[in-house]
Structures are given as C-alpha cells and as structure tokens.
Amino acid sequence: MSIVLEKVLTPGGITQDELDDLRVEQLKFMPEEGTLRRKIYDEHDFITRTLTEDMRHRLTSGPGMFNTVAERLQCINPYVLTVTWDQDIQATDQLVDQEGRIFEVRTVRAPKTYQTAKQCLVELVT
C-alpha cells in the first residue's frame, strides 16, 4: 500500500516550498542595505526610532508603476523601493541608504496573490 501526499498550494497556485525558493532568489536583486526609521508618538512628542539597520533593498529612480500616484504628488523626486516580502514598512517611514541619502516612503503597494517582495514609492528628501 502506498501513501500519496497531496501538495498544499498557496492561493497563487504554487507550493509553499516554491514560494520560499522564489523569496530567496528575490534577495539576489536587493544588493543594498540601509537603515529604516519610523516616527512614533512617545507621550508628548514624536521621536524617531530605528527599526532595522541592515534592511535589504533596491532603489530605482523614477516613479515606475507608481506613475499615477507620483503625478498627484507634484514636485517630488520619486524612486521605487523594493524590500523583502516580510519587511514592516509603511507610509512616512524613512530609509537612509549607504550614501547617507534620506528617502521618505509615500505609499506601499498592496500585496498580490503571493508576494516575493514589497514595492514602495519613496521621495528623495536629502
């Protein structure tokens, strides 16, 4: 008697192992590291906290797929930020890259059926 194990598929129709492999491969396209900061309200004032100092990412100049959003946010210097699929990131967070430039997150793209990375529209602040 043989037992046949059924593969469990993600909502996107691939196995969890295949999705995990895709996520590992995606890291090859994120060669840069940076610091992610978030402003939080602490009793009486906003303070800036560092969430991570070694966030893997890729920065690409231009609005990319965020063209419509970037047009509404006139006079910004847009970039697309790609981070790992499980990175905690939200609008108003700041990325400090290896060159010391500061980027502010304007919007984060909603996840699709399965996610190997997150993409955000960021603005070069300094």
Image (tube, helix red, strand yellow):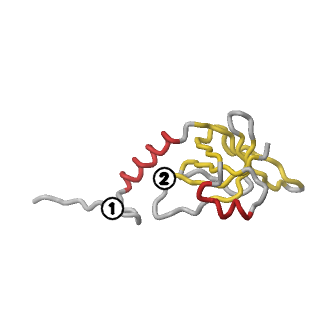
What is the three-letter code of the residue carrying label 1? Val
Tag 2: Cα neighbours inside 10 Å, few (<14), some, or many (≥20)?
some
Which one is nearer the viewer's eye here, 24 or 77? 77
Q: Quadrant of residue 118?
A: bottom right
Residue placed farthest to the top in the image?
99
109 to 60, vertically: above or below: below
Question: In the rendered view, does 73 fall on the left or right side of 43?
Answer: left
Residue on which disc 1 sits: 8
Identity of the residue drawn at 36% across and 63% down: 13
Q: Amino acid at mark 2?
A: Thr
Along the horizontal axis of the image, is 30 left or right of 103?
left
Q: Which residue occupies 72% across, 40% down?
A: 96
Give how far apart the Cα atoms at labels 1 and 2 are.
Answer: 18 Å
As drawn, the residue found furthest toward the right would be 44
First in sequence, mark 1 or 2: give its number. 1
Residue where numbered disc 2 is placed: 116
Residue under the point 39% across and 62% down: 10
Q: Foreground: 46 or 98?
A: 98
Where residue 119 appears, as percent x and y from the top left, is 59, 54
Crowd around label 1: few <14 · some 14–19 · many ≥20 (10 Å): few
Quarter of the image with the N terminus in it: bottom left
Percent from the top left, x then y, of residue 114?
A: 46, 60
Classify mark 2: helix, strand or loop: loop
Determine which quarter of the picture holds residue 11. bottom left
Give the secondary structure at mark 1: loop
